[in-house]
Image (cartoon, rainbow, N blue to C red):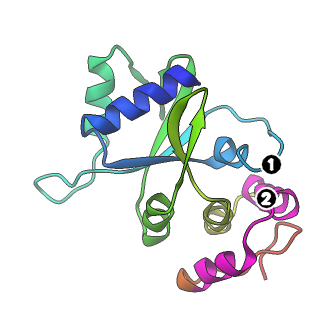
Amino acid sequence: MKSTLAVLNDLEAHGAFQRYAIGGAMGAMFYVEPVATYDLDVFVILPVSHGGLLTLSPIYDALRERGYEPKDEYVIIEGIPVQFLPAYNPLLEAALEDARTVSVEEVPTRVLRIEYLICVSIATGRAKDRERIRLLMEEGHPDLTFLTQICMRHHLPLPTTDGESS
């Protein structure tokens, strides 16, 4: 993981994206017991192209220069499948802005706050997201006041401890 995070930090430093934070199941592991996962979900704020479109091309170009090739929706970086997900709505933009800085094997990285992980899972709504909500609510001790504020601001239902939304 250390080498993968170092590559992500290098990509950010060289402008492939403006900011990143870890989300998904790997992001949840910073708060609760690990669950099985295949990849590292990396949410990114992308630079806007001349035509005003968002594109992952700068990331893929920068990775190719470093010897990493995309495969399907992933890029294997130092043995870890990484999926880059653009911050495509105000919820994800706020989540990235408010991400926590942590150190993993002495490499600084950012991870979405638990409250945003819950809200992104609510917005996505898949079965595995409902299970992640349940785990984060039961074991992760989110700030319920802050979580409620995020849900209200982004018009999301409030989560319950069973992973469902009210």
Residue 143, picture quadrant: bottom right
Name, please, the residue furthest toward the front: 106
Residue carrying label 2: 136
Amino acid under disc 1 = Val
Q: Which mark is residue 32?
A: 1
Residue placed most toward the observer, 6 or 73:
6
Question: What residue do we see at 31% from left, 44% from top?
Answer: 17
Mark 1: few/some/many CA within 10 Å (<14, 14-19, 20+): some
Is the magenta region chiefly helix, strand or loop?
helix
Question: In this image, 66 relative to 150: left or right?
Answer: left
Question: What's the CA distance linking mark 2 and mark 1?
Answer: 7 Å
User: Vertically, is 117 above or below 68?
Assistant: below
Residue 140, picture quadrant: bottom right
Q: Is residue 41 visible?
A: yes
Percent position of residue 11, x then y: 33, 33
Percent position of residue 108, x then y: 50, 36
